[in-house]
Amino acid sequence: MIDFEKELEQFEPSLEIDQVNDAIYKNDITDMTDILKEALNHKQED
């Protein structure tokens, strides 16, 4: 039988996942909210 506790102790997250996580949190990505705010600001200026 599989000893789940032992298997969990040996578990280490993939380096790829850590790298993706860092890339997501460190990037300043424009999202839909930013686009809408910018559009509203342009509309108010006109």
Image: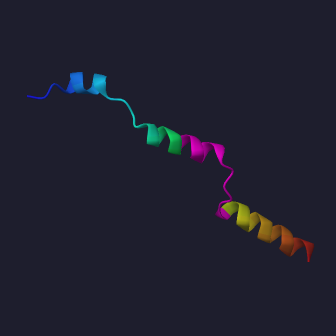
Location of residue 20 with respect to 36 vertically, above or below: above
Q: What stretch is highlighted in magenta?
A: 21-32
Residue 13 in the figure: left or right of residue 18: left
Q: What residue lies at 39% left-to-right and 34% top-to-bottom? A: 13
For the N terminus, the image quarter is: top left
Query: Residue furthest toward the bottom?
Result: 46
Q: Quadrant of residue 29?
A: bottom right
Residue 8 percent location from the top left of the image: 28, 27
Q: Does residue 31 show up magenta in the picture?
A: yes
Q: What residue lies at 49% left-to-right and 38% top-to-bottom? A: 18
Residue 5 percent location from the top left of the image: 23, 23
Query: Residue furthest toward the left?
Result: 1
Q: Relative to the observer, which residue lies in front, 28 or 37? A: 28
For the C terminus, the image quarter is: bottom right
Residue 7 percent location from the top left of the image: 23, 26
Q: In which quarter of the image is residue 6?
A: top left
Q: Relative to the observer, which residue lies in front, 36 or 30? A: 30
Q: What residue lies at 65% left-to-right and 43% top-to-bottom? A: 26
